[in-house]
């Protein structure tokens, strides 16, 4: 079983979906980009075009490569039309278990029998998603990082029933995209978020307990551990609501109190302070300046 060029579908045209479509199209695959919202599809194509412009300006691709990449992408608002002749579908829709189960039932009905079904979920069990299809051996996690065209990692997650040939195919495809795949097994948070989220939670606990301020915590992790951004800034970037929801998955999945989300994180999400997307988290994003400004609440 090989995924031939010209046979990729991406379900969900948000932040991740447009990045995934971009990297496949740039490698010569014809991509069917699918979303329930026409507005999101238009926005995605626009975002891909702007990101390609940036690559042209940097000299990493030519104008012709930009045109070729864009011409490889078609958009669909009906899922069945977009997946009916695909050999690989990558689902990157909103992180909601019921929604993803429903999407996988539909893809399973509409996609060809030999099609691999991958999900970009950050935290939902691959095994659970596979269980609603008639082909659990062909269901796998393909966890890209944000921003997709820039980040090198693909966390490849084997569900309980994933076939070895399917894993090998996804590993090989990830390399073809210029990415570095790492294969892991399906347990809560996989590896990336199982290690990242407790670190972010601990940073929030340190702030909550008054051990240090926002700038100190982030500066210590940047200068002391060579992290490109501190854990509190990263939490703002990911979205505090997303961090909370992944910590809840870890807490419930392992039943271990060490994963319990910090009460400050819960409070901030309840108050709508979810980070960059809301204009405020540990930092404030209301000004024009690109300089990081610690939120008034924490000064
Ligand atoms: N944003 C990140 O940093 C990041 C990183 C890694 C993984 N992920 C995962 O990627 C997935 C997508 O996240 P995102 O940040 O791109 O979300 P997003 O909110 O930007 O986009 C989700 C898209 O899914 C679409 N959608 C909803 N229901 C649909 C349906 N039934 N059919 C087709 N499309 C539908 C929405 O219209 C929207 O365009 C999630 O599973 C998330 O956990 C996100």
Image (cartoon, helix red, strand yellow):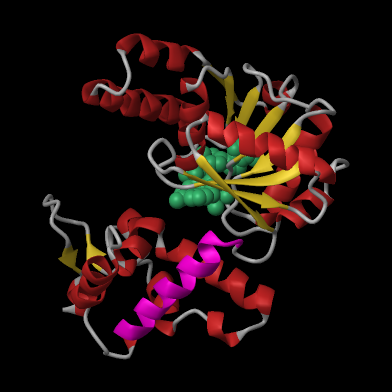
Q: Principal SS element in the magenta part?
A: helix
Please tell me which residue lies in front, 215 or 36: 215
Image-based side of 253 in relation to 282, left or right:
right
Q: Position of residue 145 (x, y in %)?
A: 47, 47
- Please identify the quarter of the rendering in which residue 186 is found: bottom right
**Above or below 184: residue 149:** above
Q: Please report the residue visible at 61 percent of the width from the left and 69 percent of the height from the top.
A: 249
**Above or below 204: residue 83:** above
Please tell me which residue lies in front, 29 or 263: 29
Image-based side of 110 in relation to 298, left or right:
right
- Please identify the quarter of the rendering in which residue 4 is found: top right
- Please identify the quarter of the rendering in which residue 165 is found: top right
Q: Residue furthest right?
A: 134
- Which image quarter has ligand 1? top right
Q: Please report the residue visible at 71 percent of the width from the left and 42 percent of the height from the top.
A: 167
Q: Position of residue 182 (x, y in %)?
A: 57, 50
Image-based side of 170 in relation to 72, left or right:
right
Can residue 36 be seen?
Answer: no
Q: Please report the residue visible at 27 percent of the width from the left and 20 percent of the height from the top.
A: 56
Q: Position of residue 295 (x, y in %)?
A: 21, 70
Can residue 86 be seen?
Answer: yes
Q: Residue furthest top?
A: 64
Q: Position of residue 50 (x, y in %)?
A: 31, 26
Q: Is residue 270 magenta?
A: no
Please tell me which residue lies in front, 151 or 208: 151
**Above or below 170: residue 26:** above
Please tell me which residue lies in front, 75 or 205: 205
Where are the magenta residues, as a range?
Answer: 190-207
Quadrant holding the N terminus: top right
Q: Is residue 196 magenta?
A: yes
């Amino acid at each position: 079983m090989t995924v031939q060029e010209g046979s990729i579908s991406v379900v969900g045209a948000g932040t991740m979906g447009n990045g995934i479509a971009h990297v496949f199209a740039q490698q010569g695959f014809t991509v069917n980009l699918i979303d329930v919202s026409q507005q999101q599809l238009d926005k995605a194509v626009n975002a891909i075009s702007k990101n390609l412009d940036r690559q042209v300006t940097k000299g990493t691709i030519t104008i012709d490569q930009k045109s070729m990449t864009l011409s490889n992408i078609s958009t669909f608002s009906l899922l069945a039309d977009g997946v009916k002749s695909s050999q690989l579908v990558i689902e990157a829709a909103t992180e909601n278990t019921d929604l993803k189960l429903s999407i996988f039932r539909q893809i399973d009905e509409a996609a060809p029998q030999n099609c691999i079904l991958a999900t970009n979920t950050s935290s939902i069990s691959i095994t659970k998603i596979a269980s609603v299809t008639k082909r659990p051996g062909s269901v796998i996690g393909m966890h890209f990082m944000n921003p997709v065209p820039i980040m090198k990692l693909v966390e490849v997650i084997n569900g309980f029933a994933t076939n070895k040939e399917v894993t090998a195919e996804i590993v090989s495809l990830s390399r073809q995209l210029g990415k570095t795949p790492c294969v892991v097994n399906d347990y809560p948070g996989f590896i990336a978020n199982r290690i990242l989220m407790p670190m972010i939670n601990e940073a929030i606990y340190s702030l909550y307990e008054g051990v240090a301020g926002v700038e100190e915590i982030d500066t210590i992790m940047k200068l002391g551990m060579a992290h490109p951004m501190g854990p509190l800034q990263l939490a703002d970037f990911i979205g505090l609501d997303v961090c909370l929801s992944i910590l809840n998955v870890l807490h419930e999945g392992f039943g271990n109190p060490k994963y319990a989300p910090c009460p400050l994180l819960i409070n901030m999400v309840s108050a709508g302070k979810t980070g960059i997307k809301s204009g405020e988290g540990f930092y404030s994003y209301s000004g024009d300046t690109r300089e990081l400004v610690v939120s008034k609440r924490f000064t």
